[in-house]
Amino acid sequence: MTQDVPFLRLRGLSKRFGGVRALEGIDWDVRAGEVHCLVGENGCGKSTLIKTVAGVHPPTEGSIEIEGESVLPLTPARAKALGIQVIFQDLSLFPNLSVAENIAVESHLDGALKPVRRAHMRRIADEVLKRLDFDLDPSALVSDLPVAERQIVAIARGLAARARLIFMDEPTASLTRAEVDRLLAIVARLKADGIAVVFVSHRLEEVVEIAERVTVFRDGRKVGTWPVAEVDQRRIAHLMTGLDLDHGVAARDMSAAPPLLTVDRLSRRGEFADVSFTLRRGEVLGLVGLLGAGRTELALTLFGMSRAEGGTIRLNGEPLVLRSNRDAVRAGIAYVSEDRLSLGVILPQSIEDNIGLAVMKGLAGPAGLIARRRRRDLAREWVRRLAIKVPDIDRPVQTLSGGNQQRVVLAKWLATRPSVLILDSPTVGVDIKNKQGIYEIVAELAREGVGVILISDEVGEAFATCDRVLHMRAGRIVGEAVPGRITERELEERIYA
């Protein structure tokens, strides 16, 4: 293969589903040993392109070449044999199997009937996890892992196969900065070995940090491909959306607002200790820190999913005892989980069904049955208020983009009319324009007097949306910052020190 022949080349690639155009006339290439970023809003065609290259969808028109040779027709098995590996956004893991079994599963998928070689699978897992420099018990069940560690397992499984091109669809969406740095170091080693990596990411700061080239998609078409040195985050965002999105500091002085939620020396063994803070009415309070800092564990306790072993919680000055999440909902506390696909929505059910889930008792008529008209009116109200883009409310949630799925989760909990809203990584896997929409929703809720606790792995997100930011480390609050009085870089240095 000559140097100017790319590993992968698409020529005039188009894909239609019935009358719907998903991709149109795509000319695109990836070079051996290249790190190439693919960006665009949800629904722009990125996932369809990946699935077409992976052999899941046959193209309607055009060609796919590997090292200058056409490989059509392409099947998933043939794509893998050619060295194409994909880590999809939904991870596609087996929750009932161990870490080692998930990582080495492809070593037992050659069609031959043979005994499971657990020691061999363990060796594969150990080798890949060592390569990732990630300390994870290979015998642990994937179902017991938090989202961030499941992402690591999915990445390790992709690396365990003999890959020449790896597509990573939002690989860092659930990772902390330290884990992102570790992943980028792995990508650099893959590049040195001549393996190409295609990143799909909504974190534009990562795009400009890691990529050699970036390709922008919009509405099923390729806008263009640029050397990353020729574009910055703002330019990429404009190419993706056609809009100029600029985040300034939104922090307000909320010290005069009345206390809403007061937490005093709250503790739970092994998770967090002596946590004290006050959330004021209408305040957006950020909670940042590295993986394992105890942020989600604290949120689950404030939502009644786990019991505090020490300390007190007061809501509007009154003591609050939370024995379950039902107590929290009755008190006016709502929680949007970081894992919206598993815990936030019931994907096969309709938008209407999902929005009404948390308030079913209030939707019941005199006979105790759900009043259909009341439920439909509620769903339509929140679809309108949150600008959820759907043709009708009977559409299953799984048919929506990530940004609109997240808005359905928000609608479900906002329908409870909470006074305190806890958002755990609400923009994970959400494109830049939908992120902006979620930020606007948060700001509007705060103006209406709702107290918001925003947990985020993105320092820039917390800096741009919060009035104050609390820093957690090893289960304790170790610092407080006010955006504007401290720079974003200074806040990052504190967190990653």
Image: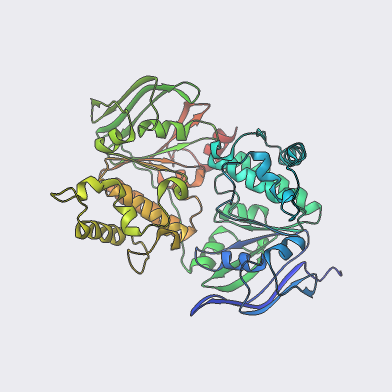
Above or below: residue 274 compared with residue 214: above
Question: Outermost residue, top direction?
Answer: 310
Across and down, in percent, residue 465 comes to 41, 47
Question: Outermost residue, front direction?
Answer: 113
Pick the front one: 345 or 39? 345
Q: Quadrant of residue 58?
A: bottom right
Left or right: where 27 falls relative to 241: right
Across and down, in percent, residue 421 comes to 33, 41
Residue 490 visible in the displayed image: no
Above or below: residue 69 compared with residue 37: below
Pick the front one: 85 or 481? 85
Residue at 69%, 51% (x, y): give it: 158
Question: Outermost residue, left direction?
Answer: 366
Across and down, in percent, residue 126 comes to 74, 37
Across and down, in percent, residue 314 comes to 28, 27
Q: Quadrant of residue 286?
A: top left
Q: Quadrant of the N terminus?
A: bottom right
Q: How many marks?
A: 0
Left or right: where 341 falls relative to 418: right
Q: Quadrant of the C terminus?
A: top right
Pick the front one: 299 or 438? 299
Pick the front one: 290 or 245? 290
Residue 408 visible in the displayed image: yes
Residue at 27%, 49% (x, y): give it: 415
